[in-house]
Image (cartoon, rainbow, N blue to C red):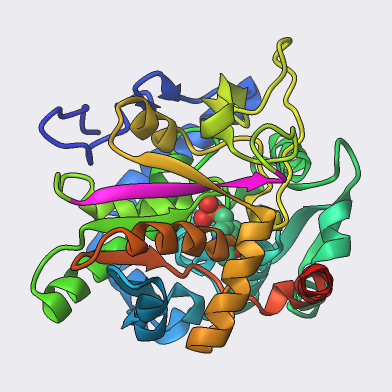
Amino acid sequence: MTELNFNSLRTGPDSNGKFGIHGGRFVAETLMPLILEVESEYEKAIKDYSFLNKLDIYRRDYIGRPSPLYLAERLTEHFGGAKIYLKRDELNHTGAHKINNVIGQILLAKRMGKTKIIAETGAGQHGVATATACALFGFECEVFMGATDIERQKPNVQKMQLLGANINPVTSGRATLKDAMNDALRFWVANANSHFYIIGTAAGPHPYPKMVRDFQSIIGEEARKQILEQENCLPNALVACIGGGSNALGLFHPFLDDKDVEIFGVEAAGKGLNSNFHAASLSAGTPGILHGNRTYLLQDDDGQITDAHSISAGLDYPGIGPEHSWLYDIGRIKYLSTTDIESLEAFELCSKLEGIIPALEPAHALHITGQLASKRKGQIIIMNMCGRGDKDLSSVLPLIMKNRGKN
Ligand SMILES: *Cc1c(COP(=O)(O)O)cnc(C)c1O
């Protein structure tokens, strides 16, 4: 493994899985041998031509990559400043970026001889992507999902069932993503020899944050090439929303060493950062340990993890991947936030102006993109449109109607 190279921000984590003081591997002793095996198999796989070749073929013929980099002319005109480009990862099979990571990890599971898969899910996007890949490979699939999320993400639950996954409802805590991940990790400890755990974001114990980032970095690698072809220069800024941080790192990572490219991560401010109803781990959290790694978390003075809130189930996580925490500490990325109401406005705006119904998660990024764009005439901004909004319609439409009633 490479050690941190201070000439580049792209070489982490170090051999202990640390990004600065963040990351690491805080897991049950029984899990340690397995997680070391995942790490060594992963390191071999990404140097193996036949593994990479298979990954390329699934990316192209199954996921539908490369995704286009689209100049959103009407949004650009609306904000009256920078050119806004959307990286169209919502066009991927299953409707979001999650499949990029799942295909990578399931190929690794297969290479390791595993045929049973565990996954946690919040919005259900990672669950659907994992159930999809399990159907494709003929693998058994155990999905852990909070009971609250099962209620608010019905279409995704139905899809997972149709695809043959077994859904394990989680009722502990607030019955959302954090609790689902706790139960998934617990199940893994008990079934470590038979099951491979596909984590859905750039979090969890080492090597997951690195592995997920690497599999998602195809987003930024494509975007970098595409903008050079289309504009003959690099963008001035990048914007992406952050739940655990995987779509954001996927876009950002290939640009980290491009000093002139400003990078903005967007957290969910829920009902406001002062309200206790948000999911902004960096803007309003402190470092602690959750789900096998050290990172910024929403926690009280006793170190109890507090509940996250966002209108968007995919951003409703009280932590963030450790690489973001490090990039925040060293100041390479600026982290801003968008409230529930602002994201609803962006959701509607994008639908009306571009004919693209965004997921609520990237609608958070779009709000910030608009604010930045309006002050940056002549510049270029790339935003990751990391998912489509079909899954959100039933929860969003009543809220939009209610907002209209107020105006
Ligand atoms: C899961 C999800 C997210 C949040 O996860 P990250 O790991 O932060 O990318 C964001 N957008 C969509 C569409 C999602 O499905």
- The percent coordinates of residue 39 (x first, y second) are 41, 39
Residue 282: percent from left, percent from top: 51, 32
Question: Where does the image place residue 344, in percent across and percent down from the top left?
Answer: 66, 66
In this picture, residue 288 sits left or right of residue 299: left
Horizontal side, residue 199 vs residue 327: left or right: right
- Find ligand 1 in the image and state its quadrant: bottom right
- Where 35 sits versus 377, above or below? above
The residue shown at (68%, 41%) is 278
Which residue is at the front of the view, 297 or 40?
A: 297
Foreground of the two, 23 or 350: 350
Which quadrant of the figure has residue 143? bottom right
Q: Residue at horizontal 42%, vertical 37%?
A: 324
**Can you say whether 262 is above or below 341 in the image?**
above
Determine if residue 117 is in view.
no
Q: In this view, does 286 lie above or below 107?
A: above
- For the view shown, which residue lies furthest in the bottom direction? 355
Number of labelled discs?
Answer: 0
Q: Quadrant of the C terminus?
A: bottom right
Q: Please state which of residues 23 and 277 is positioned toward the viewer in this rendering.
A: 277
Toward which corner of the image does residue 209 lie, by quadrant?
top left
Question: Can the viewer see residue 339?
Answer: yes
Asked if the stretch drawn in magenta spans residue 263, the answer is yes
Instruction: Point out the image quarter for the N terminus.
Output: top left
Quarter of the image holding residue 284? top right
Q: Position of residue 111 (x, y in %)?
A: 45, 59
Q: Residue lying farthest top? A: 302
Mostly what secondary structure, the magenta segment? strand
Q: Which of 76 and 184 is in front in this view?
A: 76
Q: What stretch is highlighted in magenta?
A: 261-271
Q: Is residue 69 magenta?
A: no
Q: Which residue lies furthest to the front in this view?
A: 407
